[in-house]
Image: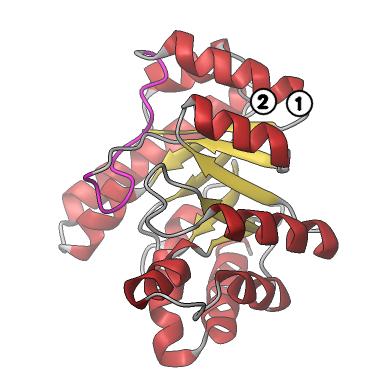
Amino acid sequence: MSRIRLGVNIDHVATIRNARGGAHPDPVRAAQMAIEAGADGITAHLREDRRHITDEDMDRIAELCRGAGRPLNFEMAVTDEMLAIALAHKPHAACLVPERREERTTEGGLDVAGQHNSVAHAVRLLKGAGVRVSLFIEANPLQIEAAQAIGAQVVELHTGAYCEAVAHGDEAASERYLTNLVESAADAARRGLEVHAGHGLDYATVVPVAAIPEIAELNIGHFLIGEAIFIGLGPAIRQMRELMDEARA
């Protein structure tokens, strides 16, 4: 099987910084360290309420990624404001995600089928600007079909339900969710979509997901930033990278 890529989400370095204010810890420094530790790309989510990553952060992260020759994956809501920012920055990829002000983290996948017109409009604009478009969706045949129909190049399968089931020791549910991820990844690949996955992945859950042959990339953030408190960001990323490589081997 081909090597699976690791995208590191550095949002929650900014969360820690913003809890107190000031300049530290700097998410751009975290992005640099992630690249040095072997990250294949950097993911950042600029939310409407700017609760973690800020506009200035995005400017600096985009500049860093360009200089380092690493792709920037810009997570964004389907809004005019975020489209304008994405079109100005022209990141390597834009991952369209659902967003609600009251949520602590992204909850569930984007309803591509139910929001067809607005999502299709965003996809057309981004692709026209040379931005690779990814849709963060549930592992659901209806959403995969809709993603293909509106011309997205990538789908990122939401792994949160699987990770929650593993965390709670529910073997039956975790097996069911993992099977769904396997089948959905195969379905998306058959439709010509590149398949990514992410949300809630940690050392205990990454191996079965990374072993799914159609998945080309995992995007992982919160766990790595939390683990960095104890062992450092570089070692946390390198350990995740080793587990992903072992899964593919």
Inter-mark Cα distance, 1 to 2: 5 Å
In the picture provided, is 228 more to the left or to the right than 244?
left
Q: Range of the magenta residues? A: 102-113
Q: Which three-letter amino acid code belongs to the residue tagged 1?
A: Ala
Predominant SS of the magenta segment: loop
- Which of the numbered marks, if any, corresponds to residue 176? none
Q: Is residue 66 visible?
A: yes
Query: Residue 154 falls in which quadrant of the image?
Result: top right
Residue 9 magenta-highlighted: no
Residue at (43, 33) in percent of width and height: 183
x and y percentages locating residue 157 in the rendered image:
45, 39
Q: Which three-letter amino acid code belongs to the residue tagged 2?
A: Leu
Vertical arrangement, residue 75 with respect to residue 184, above or below: below
Residue 110 magenta-highlighted: yes
Task: In this rendered view, identify the residue nearer to me: 194 or 117.
Answer: 117
Count the labels in the image.
Answer: 2
Vertical arrangement, residue 74 with respect to residue 151, above or below: below
Query: Residue 195 falls in which quadrant of the image?
Result: top right
Q: Secondary structure at mark 2?
A: helix
Residue at (39, 69) in percent of width and height: 18
Residue at (61, 30) in percent of width and height: 84
x and y percentages locating residue 24 in the rendered image:
50, 81
Q: Secondary structure at mark 1?
A: loop
x and y percentages locating residue 94 in the rendered image:
61, 37
Q: Which residue is mark 2?
A: 126
Q: Residues within 10 Å of mark 1 (few under 14, many from 20)?
A: some
- Which of the numbered marks, if any, corresponds to residue 129? 1
Task: In this rendered view, identify the residue nearer to me: 174 or 65.
Answer: 65
